[in-house]
Amino acid sequence: MKNARILLLEDDMALHETVREYLEEEGYEVTGLFDGDAAEEALYEASYDLLILDVNVPRQNGFELLKKARERGVETPALFMTTRDAMADVEAGFESGADDYLRKPFALKELLLRVRSMLRRRFSHPADERIDLGEGLAFDMQNGVLYRGGAAVPFGEKQRRLLQLLLQRRGEVVTHEVIAAHLWGFDETPSDDALRTYIKELRKIVGKARIVSHKRTGYQFR
């Protein structure tokens, strides 16, 4: 899936830049980080479609990071890329919640094929992932598709991400800062006017009363 959001955790500067540039050239949006604590903070502030994690990184290693994320309910597919090749390390990787394991050195094409395969699986879940919103509306959290009476409702990518975020945290007030980090990439400038437009468009679809504004704070999905 093009435009998928990928979190890349790799502290080797040269490899980091190589992988990031390669994936961006393939149409993916990549958030690149260099230590485990920064990656953990990023997972709190935004959601991603795929995690690519090195194991041996500063502050906390990739195994610890993913294990804690899984315990928090983060189900994003994760791929470890590492020089560790002992069976015990492979086992530790999968036990921490990994979906795939790529040993260094690797060909960029192989990484791309694995990324495509994992994203295909992520966006091809059955309809039982849908959240019933009432009045014939249902949102498929895995595929990011809104249905009305069984038919897909067309709307923009930013609106899709926003609705998904609000539903992931329904009942909570999602701050403007978190929304901005979730909707806009590193090379984009967040816009309050655009956000208000997205909210207005979503309210027309799901009902004005469902998305509550909290002045100077954020939005909440009831």
Image (cartoon, rainbow, N blue to C red):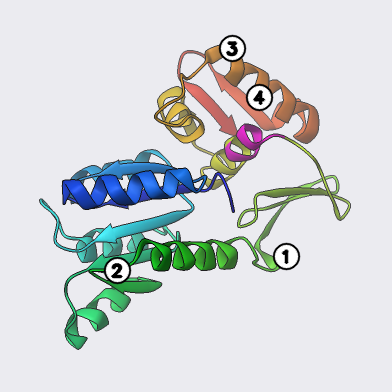
| Quarter location, residue 210 | top right
Residue 190 in sight from this viewpoint: yes
Instruction: Choose the circle earlier in sequence order: 2 or 1.
Output: 2
Label 1 residue SS: helix
Q: Are marks 3 and 4 in contact (CB under 8 Å)?
A: no
- Residue at image point 81% right, 43% down: 153
Q: Which residue is mark 4?
A: 198
Q: Residues within 10 Å of mark 1 (few under 14, many from 20)?
A: few
Q: Quadrant of residue 53?
A: bottom left
Q: Magenta stretch?
A: 156-161
Mark found first going from the N terminus, 4 or 1:
1
Check disc 3 and give the amino acid type: Asp
Alpha carbon distance from label 2 to label 1: 35 Å
Q: Give the image location of residue 113, x and y in percent.
A: 48, 67
* Quadrant showing the N terminus: bottom right
Determine which residue is flagged by label 2. 106
- Disc 4 is placed on an element classified as helix
Q: Mark 2 vs mark 3: give the one in front.
A: 2
SS category of the residue bearing label 3: helix
Residue 162 at what x, y percent from top left?
A: 58, 35
For numbered disc 2, what is the local secondary structure? loop
Foreground mark, 2 or 1? Answer: 2
